[in-house]
Every structure is written in C-alpha cells, then in structure tokens.
Image (spheres, helix red, strand yellow):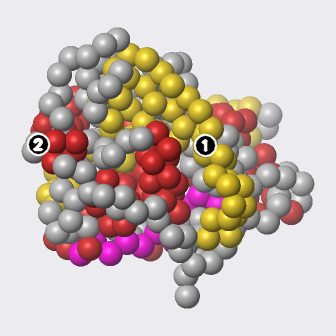
Amino acid sequence: MNAIAEPVRVQPPSPVSVHPPLLPAADPTVREGVLEIPGEIALHHGGRLHGVRLAWRLAGAANAPVVCALGGISASRRVCLDEHGWWRELAGPERPLDTQRLRVLSFDYLGGSGETTGPRNAEAFPSISSYDQAELLLRLLNHLGIKALRAIAGGSYGGMVALAFGERYPERAGRLIVLCAADRPHPLATAWRCVQREIVRLTLASGRAADGLKLARALAMSTYRGAEELGARFAGPPALEAERFVFPVERYLMARGSDYAARHRPESFLCLSESIDLHRVDASRIFVPTVAIAVREDQLVPVADVRGMVARLGAGRCHEISSIYGHDAFLKESQQLRGVFAAALESN
C-alpha cells in the first residue's frame, strides 16, 4: 500500500479569496526562501524522507493574486524577472502571466537539481510522485499564508503536478491551466524515457555520468521538437570533421545535451524522469475548473490523450493549438497562449 503523508487540513476559502479582481498593482518584487520541513515525510510510493528543504520564489506585484507556475523536470523556481527565468516568454510584465497584476509562485522540485532536497553523489533516493510535489506545494502555501491560488499553470511535468494538486487539494486552487500534460504518460513517451534513463545508469556505473546525461538530453530534445522545425533548421549537408561526418541536427542536439549536463545532476534526471512515468491521477476526481492545452504536433503527449483526460474531468475543456515546437510549445508560444491564459485567469 502506498504511504501518504497526512495533509494539513484547512477550511475552504471563500469564493472572493479564490477569484480576487485582476487590477494593476505595485511594481514587481521578488521574495525567495527555503522552507525547512521538520520530521519525516511519507512519500506516495512508500519511501520516506527526513528534514526536507523546499526552495521557493514569489515574484510579482505586492499583495496581488498568486498563480503557481510549474515547468518541466529541468525547470527551477526562477520562472521570470531574471536572466535565468525559464518561462520569460509567458511570465513577466505585460505577458500572459502579468507580474504587474499577479504574483508568480514556484519552487525547485523535490528530487531535482535545485536547492530543494534531492539525490546527491549517486546516493539512494526514493521514487517521487507528482502527488509528493503537490503536497510540498500545499505545505508551502500554508507557510506563506496563501489561502488559495488563483490558478496553477503547469507545463509538461508541471501540468502533472497541477493535476495531482487539483485532485488532492481542490479548495486551494481556483483554476488549473495544464499544458502538454495528461493524467498518465503515453507508453511511447515512456519508451523513449526508459532508454534515456538506461543511458544515464550505464554511464554512472562506468564513471562517465556527464557524458551519459549529455546523450540522454540530446535524445530527449529530439522528442520535444516537431519534424517541421527540425526539417527547416537542419536540412543542410553534414561537415567532415576528424575523419567523420557531423550532421547539423547532431551538432544542435549535442550542444543542447552539453548545456544540460553542465547544469543538472544525473541522479536528479533519473529521479524526475521516472516520476513522469510513474504519474497517474484519477481525472474523474478532479473538479477544479481545468483548461487543458494540447499541441497537435506534440510527440510526447498526443492530442487524443488530452481529449480523453478532459472527457473524464469533472469540469474541464480542451484547447488545441498547432506549433512547430511540438512539446516545447508550452515554452515558446506566447502569442497563441495569451488569450487562453487571459480567459482562464479572468473566469469566475
């Protein structure tokens, strides 16, 4: 039986606290901190962790409504308002998540490469569920005195965490905006990720973990983007280098893999990649109003899977877009997503 930590119980907030009006507020400000969680946390898949640290960031207009923004497994708490912000296309002044009218909350994932508790130096670390991430978000809201989020906007793995939160703690979020994610992973996507993880495990065992992480990320990048984009950018001829041919798309993928390996730990990649494939929520138990955004060119999360999830949701609707960026559309398509975000955040 899965061991689940007892959630903190709170009184449901009034409708006004869930949907305060979106009005221009003060200039954006940034708060950061690390929440020290005493004692033991029982995890969904049966593991336990002691003394968990949770690194968080809250950026935007003082006293404004709060939206939690969560990204893929390589995302961090730095969403916007600095050079490291991973969602600068969508979050910031006069963007879909407008930091002149909202506060944007995020945190480093449990098990990740950030400052939240995670695996280090090939040590044993328990399997992590999207439900565990949702519980840490609940603890963070309680710590910050936030009765309810206006919305959770989650892309890729962040969308999975949003769904888990919506199922477990419906009184604490007014809306879910779920991008490129469903209630369970598609087996083809799991197949690709299993190969990536095996590459990292083999190279960890041989003392070449950084090389393995580079290759795993390069393979992952080939699944994130669409055939149209790769065809347009990398159709040129290969170059002969050091007695072998190097293809334009190969150069791009290896460069992206090297960048990733320089900034992330292989143990954290294994942990969070597995967490994606362990993800299962019961969509029929999610009654938080949900907008699910599907990308027709997404190789990892097929449109049919998103449509099926929406059909099972208690209060959901599906918005479909096309993008040459495939799965990465949730990071890139600010213009297409602007109206969807505006409608979801203004709804009562």
**Marks 1 and 2 in Cβ contact (< 8 Å):** no
The image quadrant that residue 246 belongs to is top right
| Residue drawn at (35%, 21%) of the image | 62
Query: Which residue position holds label 2?
Result: 347
Q: Which residues are magenta?
A: 271-284
The residue lying toward the viewer, choosing from 214 and 114, is 114
Residue 113, x across and y down, in percent:
67, 45
Residue 344 visible? The answer is no
What is the residue that sits farthest to the front in this orientation?
11
The kind of residue on which mark 1 rests is: Leu
Q: Which residue is mark 1?
A: 35
**x and y percentages locating residue 82 in the rendered image:** 51, 19
Task: Reply yes or no: does residue 279 show up in magenta.
Answer: yes
**Residue drawn at 32 percent across, 67 percent down:** 167
| Extreme residue in the left direction | 348
Q: Residues within 10 Å of mark 2 (few under 14, many from 20)?
A: few
Q: Amino acid at mark 2?
A: Ser
Q: Report the residue at 17% width, 69% height from top.
A: 314
